[in-house]
Image (tube, rainbow, N blue to C red):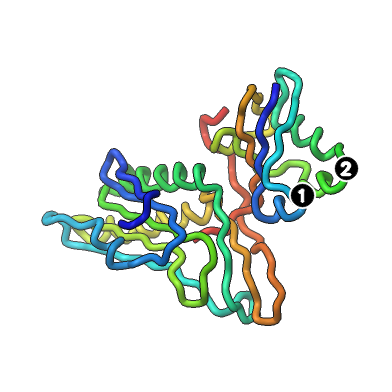
Amino acid sequence: MQVRTLFFAAYRDALGTGALDVDLPEGATVGELVTRLRSRGAPFDRLPEAPAVAVNRAVVRGEALLAQGDEIAFLPPVAGG
Amino acid sequence: MSSPASDQGASGYRIAIVQATIDPAAVLALVGNPGDGAVLLFLGTVRDHADGRPVGGLRYEVYQDMAEKELSAIAAEAGRRLGTDRVAVVHRVGDLSVGEVSVAIAVSSPHREEAYRASRFIIEEIKKRLPVWKHEQYDDGDAVWVQGRTLEPTEGAR
């Protein structure tokens, strides 16, 4: 399956990209996606091991299951207001 | 409100995330009715310093779709829990100068207690939950992403 990943603010700057399509095996979790990205090496190893992640615009835990076409956003600590 | 991102919520609240300058009077005009004896406006503005360093300006980045959803949820929660649905919240993103308004929260209610509580609730929840990031630019030419608060998983999310 394929998912769409988004990177914001400091993460986008670190990776040099704001969006990336990623192929994953069926049944992959958020945690497995993070591990797979980080294992690509630089610059992806600059992502934290357990970043805040939103799937389809809701923040989820690392064990959340992913599905074809999900929008997965990597969210650095926020500072609005 | 001038922004196309303006949204009429089911319970009467209004929210928007905009690039343009916020007009506080326009936000204030979105709340209030003849039964309300209290109308409250909170403005967050860009400070000229951070941790002792002079700040020249800043840029807010946003995850627009999620931020609109969260801001709607915050406004709806304020209405449900705090006794008024006359709530309007506008957050600005993009480049801002010192002194400019980054967020405006207008609330009206029959008595002042509910308005103060709702306004305080909304700004605190924005700081905890809104996917917005602040890139601070200092007078010495340096610029950094402000270390903010880690988002917590949403109850009931996947």
Q: Is residue A40 left or right of residue A56?
A: right
For image coordinates 81% across by 49% down, the residue present is: A46
Chain containing the residue with disc 1: A
Label 2: chain letter: A
Within-10-Å neighbours for mark 1: few <14, some 14–19, many 20+: some
Task: Evaluate whether label 2 is on the same chain as label 1.
Answer: yes
SS of the residue at dot 2? loop
Q: Which residue is mark 2?
A: A41
Q: x, y (%) of residue A32? A: 76, 30
Point out residue A67 in the picture as x, y percentages from the top left corner: 63, 22
Instruction: Determine whether the residue tagged by mark 1 lies in a helix, strand or loop.
Output: helix
Measured from the top left, where is residue B112 in percent x and y? 24, 62
Q: Which residue is mark 1?
A: A15
Circle 2 crowding by C-alpha within 10 Å: few under 14, some 14–19, many from 20: few
Q: CA distance from mark 2 to mark 1?
A: 11 Å
| Front one among B135 and A20 | A20
Residue type highlighted by circle 1 = Leu
Q: Which mark is residue B141?
A: none
Determine whether, in the image, residue B73 is placed left or right of residue A75.
left
Q: Residue at x 27, y 41 (%)?
A: B11
- Image spot of residue A63 (x, y percent): 68, 28
- Measuring 55% from the left and 79% from the top, which residue is drawn there? B48
The quadrant of the rendering that contains the N terminus of chain A is: top right
Position of residue B57 relative to residue A42, above or below, is below
Above or below — where is A74 with respect to A16? above
Q: Nearer the viewer, residue B56 or A32?
A: B56
Q: Residue furthest top?
A: A26
| Residue lying at the far left of the rendered structure | B34
Under mark 2, the amino acid is Gly
